[in-house]
Amino acid sequence: MWSVVRSQSPWRSAVKTLGCSTARHAIRGNQRVLRTVQRSKTSSSTGGSSIVKNVEKNQKQLVRTVSTAKPTSQSVIQASAAAAPQQAYKAPPAEVSKVAPQPKPVVLPDYVVMDGNHAAAYVAYALSETSFIYPISPASSMGDHMDNWAATGKKNILNQIVDVNMMQSEGGAAGALHGAVAAGSLTSTFTASQGLLLMIPNMYLLAGELMPTVLHVSARTVSKHALSIFNDHSDVMATRQTGFAMMCSSNVQEVMDQGLVAHIASLKTRLPFVHFFDGGRTSAEMSKIRPITYESMKEIFPMDALKSHIRDFALNPTNPMIRGTGQRPDIFFQSTVAAHKYYEAAPRLVEETMEEVAAITGRPLKLFNYHGSPSAERVAVIMGSASKTMEEAVDYLNTQGENVGVVAVQLYRPWSSKHFLAALPASVQKVAVLDRTREDGASGMPLFLDVNVTLSDEGSQKLITGAQYGLASKEFTPAMCKAVFDNLSAENPRKKYVIGINDDVTGTSLPYGAPINTVPPGTKQCAFWGLGSDGTVGASKTAIKTIGLNTDMFAQGHFVYDSHKEDGVTVSHVRFGPSEIKAEYCIASDADFISCAHPSYVHKYDMLSTLKKGGTFVLNSPWNTLADMDRKLPATLKRQIAEREAEFYNIDAIALARDIGLGKRINMPMQACFYDLSGVLPVEEALKLLKTAIVDQYAHKGPEVVKKNQEAVDRAVGSLKKIEYPREEWLSVQTGGQKKKRSEMEGSSKFVMDIMGPVLALEGDKLPVSAFEPGGYMPVGTTRFEKRAIAPEIPVWVPDKCTQCNYCAIVCPHAVVRPFLLDKGEMKAAPSGFQTRKAKGGAESAGMNYTIQISSYDCTGCAVCVQSCPDDALYMAPFEKVAEDNAPHWDYAYALPEKEIGEKYTVKGSQFQKPLLEFSGACAGCGETPYMKLATQLFGSRMVVANASGCSSVWGGTATTNPYTVTKDGSGPAWGRSLFEDNAEYGFGMALGTKQRRYRLEDCVQNALATTSGGHELREALTKWLKVKDDPDPCDAISHKIIELLSSQRELTGLDVNFETIYQQKDMLRTQSHWIVGGDGWAYDIGFGGLDHVLSRGENVNVLVLDTEMYSNTGGQVSKATQLATVTKFAAKGKRQNKKDLGQAAMLYENVYVASVALGANMNQCVQAFRDAESYDGTSLVIAYAPCIDWGIEMKFMMDEMRKAVDSGYWTLYRYDPRRTEAKQNPFQLDSRKLKSDLKEFLVGQNRFERLVRLNKDTASSLHTDLSNVSHHRHEKFRKLAMDEYEMLEYLKTKLGEEVSTEKSIVLYGSETGNAEALAGVFSNELKRRGVRPQCMALDDFDFDTLQNFKNVYCIIATCGQGELPGNCKEFWKLMNDANLDNDFLANVNYTVFGLGDSGYVFYNEAATLFDKKFEELGGKRIMPLALGDDKDDEKYETKWNEWIPDLWNEIQVEEPSKELLPPSYAVTVDTEGAIPTTSDIIVAPAGTKTFPMVKNLLLTPADYDRDIRHYEFDLSKTGFAYSLGDCLAVYPHNDKTEVMEFCEKYGINPEAVIALEDTQNRKDPYPSQITAAKLFTEVLDVFGRPSRRFYETMEMVATDPQQKADLGYIISKEGKDRFKELIKETVTYADLMEMFPSARLELPHVIDHVARIKPRLYSIASSSEMVGNMLHLCIVNEDWVTPSGKQRHGMSTRYLRNLSRADHVDNIAGRINAAGITIPDSHAPPFVMVGLGTGLAPFRAFVQDREMARIRGEPTGPMALFFGARHKRTDYTYGDELEAYHSSGKGVLSTLSTAFSRDQAHKIYVQNRVAEHPELIYDYLVKQKGYFYLCGPAGNVPPAVRQAVVEAFVSVGGHKAEEAEKMITDMQIEGRYNIEAW
């Protein structure tokens, strides 16, 4: 027996600490304990006498001490250990549970309320010197408590502050623990599940070396077919062979008591202990317990054992020894068995320790605790929390005449048969053993086998049954307990079975009955249904503490969560009562009080099935009247309310919280309702206590928050309304509110209906085994059926403010905000109120309308989209006001066919791709999901995702609700999760497995081509696949074709064995994109070793690290990604180490693509980084800055937080691309080159940094300064890393004070979407090719003060929306406008500006215009005139750029780069023998075009007129095209066939020769693979078009004649610019040049490369489809002209069209619809003012037709005024009769028709004169009635002249000043009401 060192009685300490009154109470309590123990001596096992002796001794000490003790303050009495853990508990012994406590109005300071993790940590801290921690649910909070106490200076029983250390993994924690014990230290750790399994190797060592220590384990399921964070014993059972002693606690009180036993017994026995308790149940259960004071622990602490069993065995050079040697077979076995004596002695020593602990607590402890009838014949054996449920059921059953009992196993290892048999009544005949684990394939479960062996060894013939129960926290209820005992009584009992589920597959389940109420009389049961983020759980915990600590009632709380990260359903099961509460299960019946915190729950969950008759139900909803309830509540709920005669109340807590300013935090109003109605405490007292609790809970957030919450309490009671419902009517009601059908559930898959539906309704427990697929496989794309409807507010789109940037969509964490494009047919079919606007953009959006739609029922209300919108085009509105109306709009848009519009690798274009991650369960405003959503939009159809455990696996892989979905063809991300620690290896293995399978497929394809004939088309496709198999887009296209060909041939004739082999592997044809995804806890800590290995291997895998800088999934613990000075869990005093630089570590390999991104700081950089990473043929690493709610920020500002982080230097944007090294470029690109704000200001905005200021200002100031210095140093390091050799040389010269070059050049850009940035990069590289070494950076990254030092400044700048500056040039613009700058500030600077814009906007290229002007105002010398690129041009901004850049080269006179004719991009074969098949009747045109017939070609002008104006009609019925008002038809014209024949003859090629073209660059839209020469030069190559300057350069390179070579060089030189202009005026063509310079003959492959493709010509559509249906009309004037030299030239397109469909012949043309650049209102009510010149009348004819049709349909139509101008009425008044008919003297739809034929009278009258004649009409239509103005015609003087006429009308009629009138027109332009279409 170990001696016990006692210093001072705990009762004496209690008196000194708590005072006389408390001590007297302790004496009375001690007396009660003494009487209780004496009464129970006869029924107790050994240890009772020692308890009596200790209690008697303590009683005497208390009596002696009271008389001399001083009184203490009430505040000390009320102090809670939970609130102040550093103060040791001083408590009298507890009463035995059978003695029911009497209610008293006084505070009982000897009680505390805590959960099991808190209790375990409390003991561990007392008895540890070191502790090694690592977060894992549900054990994490134990480590958090340890760290917090150490941070506040709490002392253990040895008067030391425990050294608490966060490790990189559980394996690391076990290794460190092993080392600490080896050094002679008391130590402990905490873990669960896989974490415990990672410790197993060290556990073997610890046990083998007989090292005392304790592992506290919140027992949790080990992942198998799926991950589960819930409880069973599979983890601890997997360690039972390690040699650890194992002790199990059943409730929170036992956790404290037996935790102390484990620590002390470990010292005594020399065995390491696992002390486990049920994770999620006991670990998180709030319970009222009596703590053990540290003084009491110290009294029984075995100091001698500490010395002899730890200290004396420490590795110490003073007394050296060796341990951990390697042993051979000759001695290992013996050495192992040598330790057996310690295991034999352990049960006795544990029992002895239990007696010692019981002596200081008054609570008996036993190795096996028997409860029940002393003469029981049937007994259950069980471990963990379920034993308490079994005890409660046993008590109930025995009162019902049964004779049963239960043995709870407390010490599981070493197993003591002796003590087990002693605990088992001699009367027992039948034993049921219940295991909370399952070992598939075993003959029996662990506990079952132990009991079997024990009874078998005794020769017992008792019946023993084995049961498995409660896996993954499956409920174990009294009804199940009863079934277990009933089975023992059966004639043929089930020997082995499962209980709690319905195994309808193998028939192993035991049925059980309906719930039975076994809780003690007087127990109040309450269920609080909450929303994850509304504070319900926290408020319930506060209530438990308040009631538990202010009454004599026992209290218990258990909390159930669904699997969503936030905003999921929570149910707080809370019980209060006068007796001990043993109900370790959820409330299943007889609930006294139920509250519902969210109105959507009434449709989702069966909340009232557990309510007892007469119970209270409180609903939070906006339905305040009986009529509302009758309409909204489902019939089933109304019947339940009536059947239970419920007291029914409602409160609109959401409106109340919103009004007060609490957002969605409704916990305090709902708690006030609970106290008001439950009767647990007197109302006034309860509300007073609640307000006090508010101060304690929210004081750290400031007085305003406290005030608001207290106000909520005051107002809640008054807002509570009782609903007096008609009970008789509701008893039989069959009607009521229904959950709205949003295309969910109904009509969905069997999985959704049969599995997901019940799971979402929290009825998954009812599902049988047969419902599930073995292996855990589940379908994707199921979250769209969920429709949670949880957001109190949702965004609403304001279309008139929207510039269609798509920012709102790219930032949306849940993919609920999306842009859609609709064609005309889809617009017509749209539901009422569906808002759209004309789609902005190029040809790709032709004929489309744009809309933003929000999925109301999937939105979480985070408001990130609203805060990120640059145009204020979104606002938040109450859910109940807008959701229902908006839902049909979303449903319609969501069901539209997917449209792939534009370039997807842009911010805007990416968002037209369907997100294949949608409606996840992530927190509102999650910073992780936008990145993964973006990845799925870019690559999702071919992604394979290996996901580490963590947040991303929770929101990405929650069972049944799976957010990863598929495209229209069924492809999408394939997602898998392995473990936390091995994700990199898991993904690596998948990539290599796929690679090997594709190698095999490649072999099969090559073999098939070599040995099998097959069809020509199939062979051609397979041959192409071999070439493009690793290039995703072309591989996808050819793979689909191969599958179609194989499938077709397989169905028709069957396949050759070789092709059949390929067909069977068709899933490997497409390229796969492998992604390894996880958080920083995985990448920086536990998985870093594996990640580093994968990075080193160079395989083509992509790694995405979602860096939240903490362990977000387990509550926010510190990781190596956590930044210096952060206060977070496990770093309570602030982190003292710098953040690990994962990116730099990866870059050291030099062949890894690395990017650091922050979406909110630079969206385009993020998109490009993803594109570059995925396209890199090697390993890539993208590190994404992901704000988290645990940072203490308001998540709606998360994108702004990203920007601030980058601007301050806290986070750096960069890209490291090894491919740049091959191109002789610096691989490192710094994308955030300049620090723009102070880091300390950034830190102030986040609670994770501000907390340190509140804790210790001096420390905070020091660490924040250190962090600022570190950030600046890191930024400077990156800045230097990004420099090339020349920049570095200049940098060093500047640093050293040496003279630097004055010939410096810089390329500055302002870019929002990335186009200007990309163009600047290309231009910078071109400068380098010409010997100029420029810097290139964003304007805001540039040091403005050094601008004067640059000789040449090239500025490339885009304009956003309506004249907005890009975000990365605004600071530079402010500096340029500094009033203190001199007018000659840039006198020595040459500059030029190129702008990128869209002429469809009012402020076209405004940013470039402003910068150009400002450079001039500051004295800069313009190199070249301002050049403006236009997205409306054929090639967008590149059209102007290609015209402008050659002139710039000539102007700046830089050296020409070496001229080298590059290899052709097409492999060309000319077949003159007919070997290559081709078709000559198909028109060749680019993708996106269609062919359709011209059915009418009508000359509108007189035959004698010199102008040819024609009316054309086209039939679109077979194209699927739809057009809208203002749209254009893009016609792809053909060259004249006669001229083509002449060209072919001169060039020397047979027009009928077939040319085979093989694209070697994998273009998206290559030329046809077979084409005749005639078709090539007629339909494809613009050989009679104007050649580019580049073509002249190419001809110069190949010219063989020296004079011709010189002439070509001269033409494109600066000196020859006049000659070049002459050639342009002469309309010299490609064909002309080749004829002029015959020695410069280009070979056909180079002709194909260097002659431009024929471009479309755009013509305004002159018809309304409402009137003409599928027909389309054009009105076109023929273009003919004579060159200066007298040559007759013909417009290519007009000549082509003019010669089609003559007489009765009908010809087809190729074309497409181009979107209008003008705005058309949604209705016909607004007035129109139209000004048309010549054929500019065309669109207005369509306008008039469209409004006429509206008038015929009976729609309201506004007035229309047409002002038409031309030269002569007789010749130019096209459609005159038609217009006059529509006018009908002012009675028709065309209200006003005013013509101006300028040459029909002596005095010329122009259209602007006619406008000026109608000022009242102009003012009325445009100002008073807010009408629309349109002008269409030639550019020049007319548009400004007409505008002036409108200005004058506003001035003369409205009395406005001219400046005001101008602004009014500008505002009209911004609103889309003043439109100009000029050419």
Image (cartoon, rainbow, N blue to C red):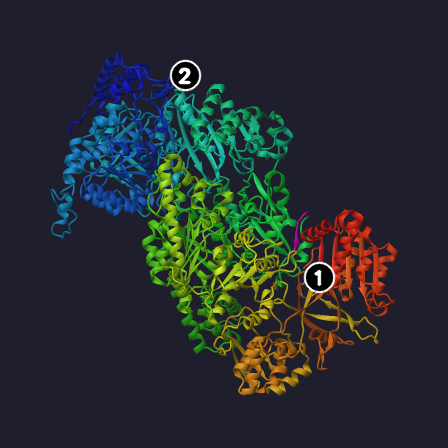
Three-letter amino acid code at the position of disc 1: Glu
**Secondary structure type for disc 1:** strand
Amino acid type at mark 2: Pro
Quarter occupied by the C terminus = bottom right
State the residue position of label 2: 105
Q: For this rendering, which residue is in front, 33 or 1829?
A: 1829
In the rendering, at what x and y percent does residue 274 appear? 26, 38
- Part of the protein shown in magenta: 832-839
One can see residue 1294 in this view: yes
Label 1, on which residue? 1877
- 108 horizontally vs 1068: left or right: left
Q: At which x and y percent is residue 1037?
A: 52, 67
Describe the element under mark 2 as helix, strand or loop. Answer: loop
Rendered residue at 16%/37% (across/down): 311
Note whether residue 1477 is visible: no
Residue 491 point in image, percent of width and height: 35, 34
**Horizontal side of residue 812 vs 8, given as left or right:** right
Left or right of residue 1662: residue 335: left
